[in-house]
Amino acid sequence: MKQRLRYSICTLRAFTIASILFVASALSVQAQGVVNMYGQVGIPVDQFAESLQGDFGYGFKFDYLRRVGVGPLYLGASFGMLNYGGERWNENWALNENVYDSEYAIENTIHDFEVKARIQPDINSLVMPYLEGFAGLSKMSTRFTITDESQIYDCDVETLYDELLSRDFGYTYGAGFGLLISLCPSETVFMDVGATYRNSSQMEYMNDDFDQVFRSRTDMWLVRVGVSFRAWD
């Protein structure tokens, strides 16, 4: 219960900070710039799905795109993160004759850094479709940590033990589609819903059993819902 409460508080704090930065970035966007923030779900396929035994990934993604000239082409970059599997539990930890009320956590994460291109024609409509493609780098890691839970409201808790169980790097590429749904009369704020198919190179990773390192492609569908801020000339 305590670890869930602290995790919720820290997640809320991180989301609030990210939202403030996102809005500040959106307000500073120059003409024909687009800033996007999504929540996303990763649905593994093929051998990756078999290794994860049905686990899905959950995370977020940020995009920044700029329009090229007056045509429908936008170019930019994105950063995304997914957590998949993982386990948390509470247990006493003895260290140097001290006993700590500790949280044990094993977390699997994926970080993606990509450049992307989007084809988005200007249509005088409340709903605007787009197509996009991307390519970039990916990092997958599994980390085991033990933290002091004596201060459940403190997000900057003391780390008592930290071990990297697995880490690998690879490349990704893919394509997708989406819809921008206008949320205001000025057509500068949109709901953005879409899906992309993410291909990857062969990478090493662990599942939520944490007793075996797998190696395969880590292909998946990414389904997202978010908000897009767009500035016009």
Image (cartoon, rainbow, N blue to C red):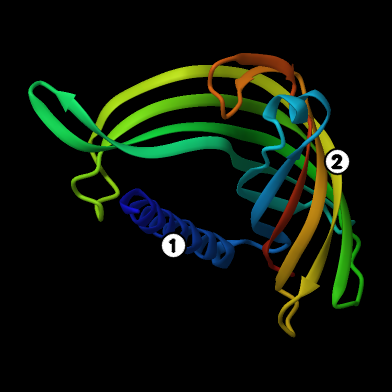
Q: Which structural element holds mark 1? A: helix
The spot of residue 175 in percent (x, y) is: 86, 40
Mark 1 closeness class: few <14, some 14–19, many ≥20 residues within 10 Å: few
The spot of residue 97 in percent (x, y) is: 7, 23
Q: Amino acid at mark 2?
A: Ala
Identified at 62% across, 20% down, the residue is 205
What is the quadrant of the C terminus in the image? bottom right
The residue most toward the bottom is 185
Mark carried by residue 16: 1
Q: Which structural element holds mark 2? A: strand
The spot of residue 206 in percent (x, y) is: 59, 22
Q: Is residue 225 left or right of residue 12?
A: right
Identified at 50% across, 62% down, the residue is 19
Which of 124/132 is in front?
132
- Mark 2 to mark 1 CA distance (whole Å): 30 Å
In the rendered image, the vertical position of residue 99 relative to residue 9, given as above or below: above
Which of 158/87 is in front?
87
Residue 48, quarter of the rendered image: top right
Q: Is residue 22 left or right of residue 57?
A: left
Mark carried by residue 175: 2
